[in-house]
Image: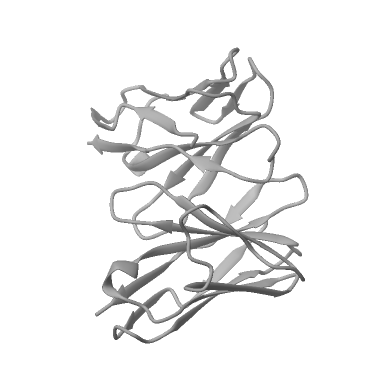
């Protein structure tokens, strides 16, 4: 089946540093979404991307939908302690826009 | 904003019993809801798509007789784990589909089967 691979698997950074993580797939996706999940809670949508090449920002977050439709990246600038959590990419495969396939996740730890 | 609730947030049960989890869209109607399962330190895996007024669509490898889904109204879907066993212990998360195909997630239900 389709899989979304995220890298890195985990990151340990200092407060104030910028962060970059990405998501790749062997097949194309029509939509790319980035979520953050805190322990014991459901994921919360951060950014949604709907067109190849689209670059979208949400505060300190920036994400891009890759031209090939097989990848996406998420950047976080000037990290703060509350950025700690697990970041998941998710994509909708062609022909099934309702369905979401989640990536493997990137665990972010921010040290003061 | 669109809010989705789940009840209970946490449940502990004995092996062999059945457990029902509710998922509600509080401020919008959702003809489609989804049920996911998440094991510790793993990603969310889609179990089934719940459609109001019709049968749920299950993903490959998910037993429909074990995980019963009922979507009887536009704001409520239920997942019943029948004859639960320790290997069913997991974090179950639902989502509701909004007007422009975005998914709003519930806070999850942690199931522990002893």
- Residue at x 26%, y 38% (from the top left corner): A109
Residue A10: % across, % down? 26, 33
Number of numbered discs: 0
Q: Is B84 displayed left or right of B63 in the figure?
A: left
Q: Is B80 displayed left or right of B54 in the figure?
A: left
The answer to whether residue B93 of the structure is visible from this angle is yes
Residue A95: % across, % down? 71, 36
The answer to whether residue B89 of the structure is visible from this angle is no
For this rendering, which residue is in front, B33 or A36?
A: B33
Report which quarter residue B18 is drawn in. bottom left
Q: Quadrant of the C terminus of chain A?
A: top left
Residue A3: % across, % down? 45, 34
Residue B111: % across, % down? 36, 72
Q: Is A109 displayed left or right of B70 in the figure?
A: left
Report which quarter residue A67 is drawn in. top right
Report which quarter residue B78 is drawn in. bottom right
- Residue at x 38%, y 51% (from the top left corner): A38
């Amino acid at each position: 089946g389709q899989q979304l691979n995220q890298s890195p698997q985990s990151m340990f950074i200092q407060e104030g540093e910028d962060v970059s993580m990405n998501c790749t797939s062997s097949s194309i996706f029509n939509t790319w979404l980035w979520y953050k999940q805190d322990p014991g809670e459901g994921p919360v949508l951060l950014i949604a991307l709907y067109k190849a090449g689209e670059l979208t920002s949400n505060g300190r977050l920036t994400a891009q939908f890759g031209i090939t439709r097989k990848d996406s990246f998420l950047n976080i600038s000037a990290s703060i302690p509350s950025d700690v959590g697990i970041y998941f990419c998710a994509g909708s495969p062609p022909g099934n826009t309702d369905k979401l396939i989640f990536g493997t996740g990137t665990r972010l730890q921010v040290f003061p | 904003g669109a809010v989705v609730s789940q009840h209970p947030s946490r449940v502990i049960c004995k092996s062999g019993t059945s457990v029902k989890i509710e998922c509600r869209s509080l401020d919008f109607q959702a003809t489609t809801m989804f049920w996911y399962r998440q094991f510790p330190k793993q990603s969310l895996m889609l179990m089934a798509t719940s459609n109001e007024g019709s049968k749920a669509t299950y993903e490959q490898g998910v037993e429909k007789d074990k995980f019963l889904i009922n979507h009887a109204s536009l704001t409520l879907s239920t997942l019943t784990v029948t004859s639960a066993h320790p290997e069913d212990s997991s974090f179950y998360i639902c989502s509701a589909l909004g007007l422009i195909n975005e998914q709003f997630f519930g806070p999850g239900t942690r199931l522990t089967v002893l």
